Amino acid sequence: MHISADTELATLNTLALQGRARAFARAEDEAGINHALAFARAQGLAVVPWGQGSNIVVAGDIDALVLQVASTGRQVISRDDNRLVLRVAAGENWHRLVGWTVQQGYAGLANLALIPGTVGAAPIQNIGAYGVELAHCVVAVHGVRIDSGEPLRLGASDCAFGYRDSIFKGELRDALVITSVDIQLDERAAPDCSYPSLAAQLAENGIIQPTPQQVFDAVVSIRQARLPDPAVQPNAGSFFKNPVVPAAQAAALLRAEPAMPSFAAGNGEVKIPAAWLIERCGWKGVERKGVGVHAAHSLVLVNSGANSGQRLLQLAAEICASVQARFGIGLDIEPRIYGAPA
């Protein structure tokens, strides 16, 4: 495996933001991962685990070894009646994995179709869409400690999964390279079609009892209609989390803004769509200095030519400030931010 120095990252992140890594390695198996980590320890380099760069803001040069995990492989490790556990290498493309599972007739992942990135990145963010989160299906996450090279297995309960959150964004951030994920699937379970826009799409297609493949197709159709393709218009998908606020705060906001959508989040809290808040503040379709807010979806920030992570983050900060000023709600950024400005 080759380790290169001073590597440009613009083609390795879906926002196409410029920045250079002090060192870069692409590992296609666990041996390659271990070799790269040993090199980093010997050189005294920090390590930044990398997948397909679909949830990353490159804010400038990264003084570390950027380790792209590109391992592949799928293996059924257990089967019980109609359920099975599939071990998937971290470098596998997430959307292609979902497509393969529905082709086999397995339920569990169809709602998570067309989410960009790799399998190894999925548990970090606890990816979720259309009423389903990855946490519902994870059995275990396997990895290697960056500081020692020791293997580590975390069961689902060890991962501290939450809304777009996990232990990999907290205690284990940049402390572990994920090598594989064990996912439980069901050959007979009915897909979850309770999410309103998904249910509406299926109903429009005249589908009453959908198969996993039909749910997959519906999700792909919805996402393609609403979200820009990063290969055409560089973006990182949803840039902000949907805020969760106390029920009393939501009730006060609804009195002032009766049209505001809201959803029960449990524990006396309410989830409010960040896209609605951003749009109400007048940001939808705004473009400045080569970065902007997508014209069809206010959650998506796009790089329209600036190639500067700092400009993108400045725009994000202005959006957050305006939402805070108008609604008294803070927005959190979803992507990870790496690199210092030049």
Image (cartoon, rainbow, N blue to C red):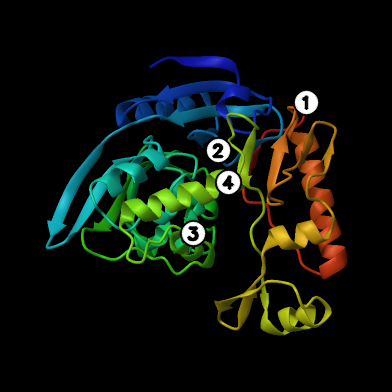
Q: Quadrant of the C terminus?
A: top right
Q: Is residue 290 above or below residue 87?
A: above
Mark 2 to mark 1 CA distance (whole Å): 22 Å
Say which amino acid is labelled 1. Answer: Ala
Q: Which quadrant of the figure has residue 154?
A: bottom left
> Do tag 4 and tag 3 residues touch (Cβ < 8 Å)?
no
Residue at x 30% of width, y 27% of height: 31
Residue type at numbered disc 3: Gln
Which mark is drawn over residue 225? 4
Closer-to-camera residue (121/233): 233
Distance Cα–Cα, label 4 vs label 3: 12 Å
Indicate the amino acid at tag 4. Answer: Ala
Q: Secondary structure at mark 2?
A: loop
Can residue 160 be seen here? The reply is no
Q: What whole-number distance in Å separates the C-alpha atoms at marks 4 and 2?
A: 19 Å
Amino acid on which the number 2 mark rests in the picture: Ser
Looking at the rendered structure, which numbered label has been put on residue 3? none
Q: Which residue is mark 1?
A: 342
The residue tagged 3 is 201
Q: Residue at x 15, y 53 (%)?
A: 78
Q: Which residue is mark 2?
A: 54
Label 3 Cα neighbours within 10 Å, binned few <14 / some 14-19 / many ≥20: some
- Residue occupying image coordinates x 39% and y 51%: 216
